[in-house]
Image (cartoon, rainbow, N blue to C red):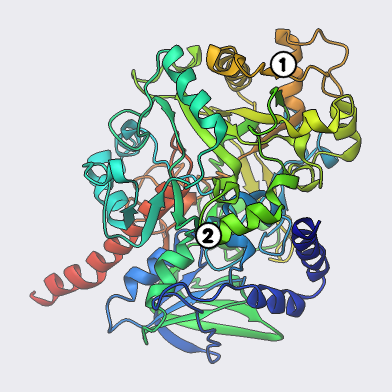
Amino acid sequence: MRGILFPLIFLTVSVTAHKSSNLFDFWTDLFRPLPRNPEEGFLKDYTPQNHEEFDFVVVGAGSAGSVVANRLSEIPQWKVLLIEAGGNENFFSDIPIFAPFLSLTPMNWGYQSEPETKACRGLRGNVCFLPRGKVLGGSSVLNFLIYQRGHPEDYNDWARMGNVGWSYDEVLPYFKKSENIMIDELKNSSFHGKGGYLDIDHSPFKSPLEKAFKQASVELGFEWNDPNGESVIGFSKPQATMRKGRRCSTSKAFLEPVRFRKNLKVSKYSTVTKILIDPNTKTAYGVEFTKGNQRLQVYARNEVVMSAGTIGSAQLLMLSGVGPEYHLREMGISPIVNLPVGYNLQDHVTFSGNAFIVNQSNLCINDITAASPVSALAYLAGTGPLTLPGGAAGLAFMRTKYSTDLAEGRPDMELVMGAGSLAGDFLGILRTLLGVTDKWYWQVYSSLPPEERQRSFAMNPVLIRPRSVGRLTLRSAHFADPPRIHPNYFDHPDDLQALKEGVRMVQKVIGTKAFQRFGTRLHNTPFPGCEHLIFDSEEYWECAIMQTSITIDHQVGTCKMGPEGDPTAVVSSRLLVHGVQKLRVIDASIMPRIPAAHTHAPVVMIAEKGADIIKEDWIYNTKINSLF
């Protein structure tokens, strides 16, 4: 009982803290673990003077901004300010399996989509929840820790679109630069890096389902491989941004080791509301932000770097006069540069809610198991089920018949095996995260006895090559009003059909001898809204997919990278905003097309490469120009 009370107390405090940022600051700092080595500790908060000048102002200390700030501050002559709306990570955010829980805390911006017509139908309000990190480390603190890069042709596609310097051979060194591979069998791989800031490791916990998953891959004719190596298609244990069984966020990896650099300042709990752009010269010269009861402006001598993410960067650009001219005028904003900001929104969607029941009680993990004193003690020792990245115990990358436009070897479907399922969500944390109502939950799972709900796991198909494209627009001219987000999931008919084939792929895996020796079966109570259809029919799965499909938080593309003259592009291949001087965007929003990957690794790569581009422009090119 004590093991359950601890997370419950924190959950209560976190919900209460939504109404009191001071209380939240207290609890996050209170539960911050003691430094685990001399290089790891607290980042000191810095409040700039109004109108203070820096060489570079970086907006957002997330997956990209933490990397950019580290690399720019390597130049001791450059004074760098990193601005973050959130505060510190804490003890709970370090626990890998707690990833779903973190989206219920103030570390999440709390975005949600506009009502969708073909997705999230069975969720609260018909909307999809879109968690984004509001904390040092950003979404690398909220995500499921999966480190996966995608297929080489994903990046060659970017280069073929006219983005010079972004082919796979050109970006692979940046993937490797940030990486410190800790997996013994991969330490000599030419595809992995050693000595970088970001630790990549397997969970030290071996899920009992992992063996069955590996055996199933052999039965189905797939390799057990490294998805970041020579071949993406195959089955594997998830590689994770993990250090000694704990989350290794970009804040922990890139900021804490350099916290004593005198030229790097970090302003926490500071919300940027506008980029300062001279409308005559079209030059960015700083940002405006709020901190406490203060409204401050800081200036950038060299550049403003936007790393606020796919949602935040697009919103701030438009609020500052950079975006579709007609839309800005609708919002009462004077346009400075007419660019297609907010278009090209892409995301990965997964079908959730299914539960597979097994006949042994020691195979699966549920929230009661995770909250037990035994699991807590194992975690403190650096092992146990709490070290599973978001609860994921296995990954598989495959091709559907809808991938005929892709070269051989390029997957369009991913299967993620979870060590537990929604059926075992006794405390309701997963329900709250997904937006599933209690009524929906009990209608589907009340027929299962508690012991069977505990003996359940999930295997979810993820559409990793979506064709549907959405858009982000402003709700008003005020930053406090969240933007309107239209993911348009399943707008392209092939997406729904491909995900339905993904469901059939899951059934093939479950039907192998490896899983059937545990009597594995799909719980067959129909989802609400689909009861009129024959269970397991094609029509039933189409209905069910539209009821509970959700994002896996991989939104990209709203500030698309493309060459000058591309009417769909917002930034150049050097990540400079077209038509604006001294303004760069370095985050997931610049991706012209979403890679078939969990997007954290590509974002870190973009930040590494973007920081090098800045150094080239301000050091190498400056030296060249000084010779003439």
Give the residue at mark 2.
381
Q: Is residue 534 left or right of residue 326?
A: right
Task: Name above or below for residue 470 compared with residue 483.
Answer: above
In this view, which residue lies farthest toward the bottom? Answer: 49
Mark 2 secondary-structure assignment: loop
Q: Is residue 625 left or right of residue 173?
A: left
How far apart are labels 2 and 1 at the CA level? 43 Å
Number of numbered markers: 2
Image quarter where the C terminus lies is bottom left
Image quarter where the N terminus lies is bottom right
Q: Which residue is at a point 73% across and 25% down the rendered structure image?
A: 546
Give the residue at mark 1.
541
Q: Quadrant of residue 613?
A: bottom left
Q: Is residue 485 left or right of residue 622?
A: right
Q: Position of residue 288 (x, y in %)?
A: 58, 77
Q: Quadrant of residue 65?
A: bottom left
